[in-house]
Image: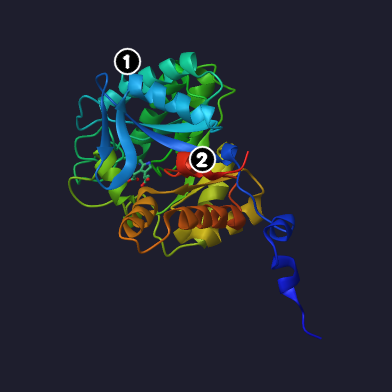
Amino acid sequence: MIRRFRRLRASPEMRSLVRETRLAREQLTLPLFVAPGSGYRTEVASMPGVFRESVDRIVEHAKRAFDQGIVSVILFGLPESKDAEGRSALDPSGVVPRALEALAKAVPGLLRIADLCFCEYTNHGHCGPLDARGVVQNDVTTNLLGAQARVLADAGASVIAPSGMMDGMVSAIRSALDQGRHHDIPILSYAAKMASGFYGPFRDAADSTPSFGDRRGYQMDPANGDEAIREVEADLAEGADCVMVKPALPCLDLIRRIKDQFQVPTAAYQVSGEYAMIKAAAARGWLDHDRVMEESLISIRRAGADFILTYFAEAMAAKLPH
Ligand code: PBG
């Protein structure tokens, strides 16, 4: 007997009846880049459709996204000044705290995820202060991350998302938040974050390319899967409420392993390079933009991601049926 799989593929209605994976607007988190000044909005060259925006423009942008059904944004800062210690990361009147305050007022229903890292604030572009050899100091950095988390939580962050891959960062941040009476603010840990070439365009956008060396001393070797499981296990033990895998398409196997093993809310970050790749090929007519956008996002969901941080959030939301 022939097994006739095609019976269930014969019409759009039949296909939608048996579709296993769906994508909803609430599963898409929009990344935003907050710049100083006002009335400022400039497109990132390597990321068409992605902008660096001053706080007033961020608010307008977030409102539009929220009206489309997007319920969360993640904020990255482009500070006015950088130094070796990344001091501007702790400034309560810095661009990200100001954006958090403005968003809380203007779009209260929108979840404000604050990325937590020092690489946007240090003049050398590494994710924390360096020792004499030029190596990021782990325990100094975790303390600073705790302080930065307090500043962002005080300013109105709904979720704190540490992305620096320092050991012990989650417990340091949890205690700092609790000491600041922010017991209710969850931590979304970038638990399995690879030292990936796919972050290239982001570093353009955030002006955070390391001035020397690379991040292989703290981010994970993309060759390692078992280690990703151990990273997630450690972050959960330290108090992470949800975890993230990054990048997304190169790590579909890890999303699935983590989801199967821990059954915790698991996010995936479809990063700048994944976005740029699709944009560039589509611009040349080599790929169908909308099809590939949707297929990449549904594949990340199928692998097990509960929600996806993606620069396609608005474009995808615009295509989803109501
Ligand atoms: C900050 C951070 C990075 C990204 C998210 N948070 C850059 C990096 O680790 O170099 C990358 C996101 C993207 O590529 O879209 N540490």
Question: What x and y, as percent, mark residue 110?
Answer: 53, 25
- 297 or 201, which is in the foreground? 297
**Is residue 168 visible to the viewer in this orientation of the structure?**
no
Residue 116's place in the image compared with 57, above or below, is below
Q: Residue at x 20, y 40 (%)?
A: 124
Q: Within the displayed image, which quadrant is ligand 1 positioned in? A: top left
Checking the image for residue 93, the label placed there is 1
Question: What x and y, as percent, mark residue 208?
Answer: 25, 40
Extreme bottom residue here?
A: 1
Q: Which residue is mark 2?
A: 318
Question: What x and y, as percent, mark residue 146?
Answer: 42, 27
Q: Amino acid at mark 2?
A: Ala
Checking the image for residue 274, the label placed there is none
Q: Residues within 10 Å of mark 2 (few under 14, many from 20)?
A: some
- State the image quarter where residue 96 is shown: top left
Q: Residues within 10 Å of mark 1 (few under 14, many from 20)?
A: some
- State the image quarter where residue 181 is shown: top right
SS at mark 2?
A: helix
Residue 305 falls left or right of residue 17: left
Question: What x and y, as percent, mark residue 308?
Answer: 52, 45
Q: CA distance from mark 1 to mark 2?
A: 34 Å
Among numbered discs 1 and 2, the one appearing first in the sequence: 1
